Image (cartoon, rainbow, N blue to C red):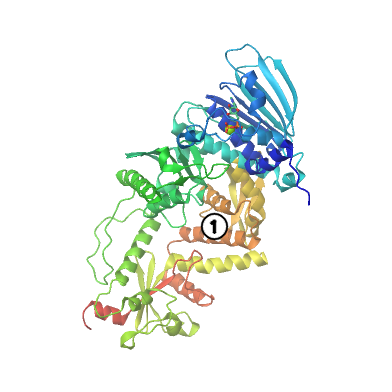
Amino acid sequence: MKINVLDQVTIDKIAAGEVVERPASVVKELIENSIDAGASSIIIEISDGGISYIRITDNGTGIEEDDIKRAFLRHTTSKIQDENDLSSIHTLGFRGEALSSIAAVSMLEVLTKTKNVDYGISYKINGGIPEELSQTGAPDGTTFIVRQLFYNTPARRKFLKTAITEASHIGEIVTKICLSNPSISIHFINNNQTKIHTSGNGKLKDVIYQIYGREIATNLLEVDYTTKGLHITGLIGKPMISKGNRSYENFYVNGRYIKSNILSKSTEDVYKDYSMQHRYPFVVLSLNVDSHDMDVNVHPTKMEVRFLNTQKIYNELYEALNEALKEKELIPQIEIPMPTIISEPDNTPPQKENRDLNFYMEEMKKRVTEYHKEPSVKEEGSANEESSIKAEASIKEAPKDYQINLFEDKLISTEAKQEYRIIGQLFETYWLIEYKENLYIIDQHAAHERVLYDKTIAEMKSREYTTQMVSPPIILDLSMKEANLLKSHINTFEKIGFIIEAFGQDSFSVSGVPDNLFKVAKKELLMDMIDSLSDEFDKKVNEDIIDEKIASLSCKAAVKGNSHLSMKEVDALISELLTIENPYHCPHGRPTIIAMSKYELEKKFKRIV
Ligand code: ADP
Ligand code: MG
């Protein structure tokens, strides 16, 4: 065995693998350098997803002639001097790895000029090997041009996705950076088209408007929360503009964009009380944390931080958001009475039928669940109580020979059909059904969804959908990312009956929709469906998952659009439910049926002790 000492070019190439994963990492590193250089204007231009061309121009300090060559060596930085500085970093960069790494795997050119000299410097370096350094005319600031990324590392190059996907990764990084730098004007151009252009006027709200548009920008709440060693500021979306995936949660810690489970969890936990399940909030939050309370030096690309006291961060963020949401009380809190069978008629005016319906449904369900969890009679085991509200209740050892089990009692069976009695509807949502010794409560929406879902999946497989034309067509103006999502899953949409055509750059026209969505197929629904695919984006997911996702969303929507069912329709619905293999849960996992036994009622009324 012979041990070789690697040369610098090879070492840099290997190291580059850690910092430069894809074009978006180059863009991130170079923009961060521009920010560290005090730029107030940054222009990012890419073509071919950044694979063949990236240009970043800033009006920052520039690099001095004497420093240029050194800037491209490994571990050279102007931002820290020694390890003592590590605990008080106030710049985005500090490792001195980016330039050497990028230069090692591309053909790079830099043009830079500082204010104190009247000429600029041009420097070229290919695959880490210096080519040319010369004086030239240039404006104040720095321009990097990165060509043919990974041209000398074919294995890496092969790993890249399509130009469209790479461009959307870049778009995302640029978005995150714009949101944390409202005072910097950022202009992002992809294939000669402006994709993002922020004004740099310092107002976060304006940045949000410029990136996400009016609907989000006009539904924001302010967060400004200070406690010892922590300052949280930002804008958060009202619960009504919640999103189908997590990519609208933007967290910055000391100016650096990060991904953090603890911050996401805390945020989502607060919103849970205000919005539907499986929805994610829109937030742009900056946390200023005393740098002694955390460690940013975790991962080379620095998308993670380690907090020294995670519980404190969780609690404080929860508090900050809860304050903001509660203060601007958006959802009228109504006291929902305990679910007693006979109660005073409710004289409060009916709430408007709108998207808050789900909120009430959830609240109602929570209370019903809580109610059943409380053992009303001391000696009763609460486990038994609980089992009665779970449709899939398993057979348990029950005291007093009592138990309730849907599988046993077979409400959902064709034989049962003849014997049950529909009592009526409650809160325009739940159907009460008497069957043998039990009262069953069927959530109309969940049941309807369940039935439709199975139908839709079957239709998808056999392509037996029906389409209704919409005129005029619905026009969708999408972001780059959304457009890519739609493009890559357009087949699935067509499988259930959508007719969608490209309509100019990143715009689409929808001229046909599935029959059962005719009433509800609005722009918002389509955007929601596209949104919800985002989690799957880039992963090699199997087609079935996408099919299921789209099917379940379309059912959910169809049900919302048909909230009033007659007794006859309900009867039909129940008998359809009977034919389904697993009727006890809707496609989203919520129960479709809960039950309360005669025995329980008698206990509640103290007929039995
Ligand atoms: P780091 O950012 O961790 O210091 P880099 O390799 O990204 O390391 O950059 C090396 C050095 O080059 C920086 O410390 C900085 O002095 C200089 N530099 C890089 N980009 C710019 C820029 N756009 N403007 C001014 N100086 C820059
Ligand atoms: Mg840097």
Query: Is label 1 within 8 A of ligand 2 (CB to nearest ligand atom)?
Result: no
Query: Ligand 1 lies in which image quarter?
Result: top right
Nearer the observer, 95 or 395: 95
Residue that lies at the very extreme toward the bottom in this rendered image: 401
Percent of width and height locating residue 185: 53, 27
Residue 287 visible in image: no
Residue 285 visible in image: yes
* 179 relative position to 476: left or right: left
- Which residue lies at the image location 52% right of the left edge and 49% below the top edge? 522
Percent of width and height locating residue 38: 52, 24
The vertical placement of 267 against 228, above or below, is below
The vertical placement of 135 against 301, above or below, is above
Give the quadrant of residue 431: bottom left
Q: Quadrant of the C terminus?
A: bottom left
Give the quadrant of residue 139: top right
* 385 relative position to 168: left or right: left
- Which residue lies at the image location 56% right of the left edge and 27% below the top edge? 78
Circle 1 sits on which residue? 517
- Which residue lies at the image location 54% right of the left edge and 37% below the top edge? 175
Q: Amino acid at mark 1?
A: Leu
Percent of width and height locating residue 438: 35, 80
Residue that lies at the very extreme toward the top in this rendered image: 118
Q: How many C-alpha atoms fall within 10 Å of the one at disc 1: few (<14), some, or many (≥20)?
A: many
Nearer the observer, 556 or 93: 93
Percent of width and height locating residue 258: 50, 43
* 371 relative position to 422: left or right: left
Q: Secondary structure at mark 1?
A: helix
Nearer the observer, 146 or 49: 146
Nearer the observer, 10 or 225: 10
